[in-house]
Each structure stands twice: as C-alpha cells, then as structure tokens.
Amino acid sequence: MIKSDVKSKLYGVVAEFETPDQLLVAARKTREAGYSDMDAYSPIPVHGLYEVMGGERTILPWFTLGGALLGGIGGYMLQYWVSVIEYPLNVGGRPFHSWPSFIPVTFECTILGAALATVIGLFAIYKFPQPYHSIFNAPGFKRASDDRYFLCIEATDPKFDADGAKQFMESLDPVSVSEVEP
C-alpha cells in the first residue's frame, strides 16, 4: 500500500548528466537493470539513444506515406478532371491529357499531403502540443534545452521503487538526482 501511495505522489526519478556519452551509458545501464518506462531529454540528438532505450517503431511514417499518396493522386486527378473532362482546351495542338505538364502540381500536392498527414499524425498519436509536463518540475530541467542531459525513470515502471530507483540513479555518477512530483 505504501509503494502505490508513493507511486501516485511521484512522476519519477530524474538524473542530470553533463555529456551525451554519460547519458547514453546511463540509459544502457538503466535498460540492463530492467527498467522499461524511462525517457531521456537532450538539447541535441544523441545517436543510438532511442535504440538503447528500447524504442519501438511508430506508425507515423505510414501516416506520412498515406498523406503523400492521397495528395499526389488527388492533385493528378484534379488536373485530369479539369483538363480532360470538365474544361478541355486545345492549346497549341497538345493533347488534353498532357501528363508531363501535370507533374509539377502533382509533386507539390504530394508534399502538401505528406506534411499535413504528418502534422495530423503528431497531434493524434503523440498528443501534441503538450504545454505542460510533469518533468518540467525537475530541478534544473530548464538546462535540458541548453547544455544538460536528463534521464528519468517513470513511476509507472513495474520495477519502480522510489528509494531503489534513486539509489540506482546515484550509482550512474550523475551531476544530481531528484524526485519529480506530478
């Protein structure tokens, strides 16, 4: 009963590191220790961090591909419908279905469809924008966008024990370790 009460009062335990290499090593050790619900925060992309943390593939690229296909096909079919079916014009003796002239607009519609589908996918899958998150309560977290690297073990992890997680994080030789309240 006490453990569940502690879990409800904490978002997690966060450790602060000075370099991306320290963060990568800490994430690897945390994963090897059996923690699965964790997240890392970094001012720059850290190569290999997503894989070390056990990141899974997302369906966002499929949203993007679907939007690109719909945009491209829609753009081409609109031009075909206007130029061949609804309002055919004989310009310089070219055929009504002159597909080479349709390519630039088709390309632009493909890019537009992919971009819109990606933004919609980000809103739907990841619940963007998220103007507030519990991790913002961590001491010194403002430096995560400047020059510090953070690793957080979340209280939703099945193996999470506040004291045990804090001791484990301290063994990773961070700058600081703190508990984060929701």
Image (tube, rainbow, N blue to C red):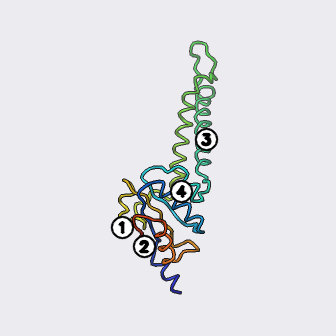
Within 10 Å of disc 3 (Cα), the crowding (few <14, some 14-19, many 20+) is: some
Q: What residue type is labelled 3?
A: Leu
The mark that comes first in sequence, 2 or 1, is 1
Helix or strand or loop: what does disc 4 sit on?
A: helix
* Looking at the image, residue 2 lies above or below residue 105: below
Tell me, for residue 139, which label it has, or none. 1
Q: Which amino acid does label 4 sit on?
A: Ala
Helix or strand or loop: what does disc 2 sit on?
A: strand
Q: Which residue is drawn at 45% across and 75% down?
A: 10
The mark that comes first in sequence, 1 or 3, is 3
Within 10 Å of disc 2 (Cα), the crowding (few <14, some 14-19, many 20+) is: many
Within 10 Å of disc 1 (Cα), the crowding (few <14, some 14-19, many 20+) is: some
x and y, in percent, of residue 163 in the image: 48, 78
Q: Nearest the camera: 160 or 135?
A: 160
Look at mark 4 in the image and give the residue it sits on: 124
Q: Which residue is drawn at 52% across and 43% down?
A: 115
Q: Nearest the camera: 179 or 61?
A: 179
Q: Which of marks 3 and 4 is in front?
A: 4
Look at mark 3 in the image and give the residue it sits on: 70
Q: In which quarter of the image is residue 85?
A: top right
Helix or strand or loop: what does disc 1 sit on?
A: loop
Q: Nearest the camera: 122 or 138?
A: 138
Are circles 2 and 1 on residues that touch, CB within 8 Å? no
Look at mark 2 in the image and give the residue it sits on: 179
Q: Which residue is drawn at 35% across and 63% down?
A: 140
**Real-space CA distance between mark 3 and mark 2, rounded to the nearest whole angstrom:** 47 Å
Q: What residue type is labelled 1?
A: Pro
Q: Nearest the camera: 182 or 13?
A: 13
Q: Which of marks 4 and 1 is in front?
A: 1
Q: Which of marks 3 and 2 is in front?
A: 2
The mark that comes first in sequence, 2 or 4, is 4
Q: Which amino acid does label 2 sit on?
A: Glu
